Amino acid sequence: MVENPRTIKTYVLRAGRMTDAQKKAYGELKQKWAFEFKPGEKLCPCDLFGNNNPVICEIGFGMGAATAIIAGENPGKNYLALEVHTPGVAKLLQLIKENGLENIKIIQYDALEVINSLPDKSLDGFHIFFPDPWPKKKHHKRRMITRPVTDLFCRKLRPGGYLYFVTDWEEYGYWAMEELSNTPGLTNPYAGLTAGGGFAPCQDWRPRTKFEKKGIDAGRKIIEIIFNKEDENG
């Protein structure tokens, strides 16, 4: 029996300190740039953003630095930013205001429940950068990149859409490659290359963050994976 992907939490809420500026941003800016999700409701990206621009969903944006840079460089795309940790939400709210960004909406809620509420074929991409690797074997079922969760992602992507996953946990990278390779409807554009084992080359447009630098300084390898949604018309 396949478990509903919403029944297993992919995160643990951890206490985190906020600066006075972050507390102020969270209190004053949340109503403008964050959407209060209610369990069971159905969401439509065009209603959230007020336009029909392509929508990229970022799952777990951390402190939001990369999210803000990518959104600022791509004003013609909308970014649905999902995060459960309040300090990160507060920081991204600050960055949105400081940079005058109009193409980000934040939802502070369980990402899988939010994604499940979206129409099928409504997203143009997923960004999943450095999610919790859940290294203990007994916790592998909590990983974000695992079936049947990857099947859910595939359903929500438009044909031609993409899923972009990055980790500094090598074992998780190989796990994710296998799970995505076994997901019907997704194809790996780098699978046929003789070098690289199907992993994607470094994408120059993805900003490097302090978190990533810490992994590199600790000697961990950065693994990047990209899969595309197949064109249903062949």
Image (cartoon, rainbow, N blue to C red):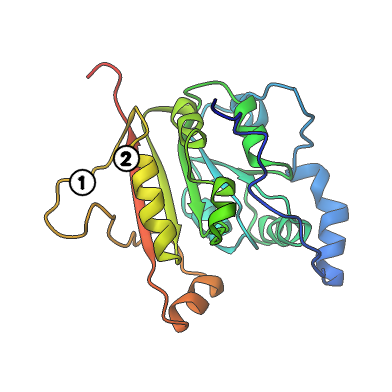
Residue 32 in the image: state x and y as whole percent.
78, 43
Q: Is residue 54 above or below residue 9?
A: above
Label 2: few (<14), some (14–19) or many (≥20) C-alpha neighbours in 10 Å: some
Name the side, left or right, on which 107 lies relative to 228: right
Residue 178 in the image: state x and y as whole percent.
34, 45
Residue at image x 46%, y 25%?
Answer: 155
Residue type at mark 1: give it: Ala
Name the side, left or right, on which 91 lies relative to 186: right
Label 1: few (<14), some (14–19) or many (≥20) C-alpha neighbours in 10 Å: some
Mark 2 residue element: helix
- Locate the N terminus and report the quarter of the image it occupies: top right
For mark 1, what is the residue?
191
Q: CA distance from mark 1 to mark 2?
A: 9 Å
Q: Is residue 41 above or below residue 70?
A: above
Q: Which mark is residue 1?
A: none
Residue most extreme to the left: 194
Q: Are marks 1 and 2 in contact (CB under 8 Å)?
A: yes
Q: Quick one: 225 or 179, which is closer to the camera?
A: 179
For mark 2, what is the residue?
181
Q: Nearer the viewer, mark 1 or mark 2?
A: 2
Q: Can see residue 104?
A: yes
Q: Is residue 90 above or below residue 144?
A: below
Mark 1 residue element: loop
Q: Quick one: 122 or 70, which is closer to the camera?
A: 122
Residue type at mark 2: give it: Ser
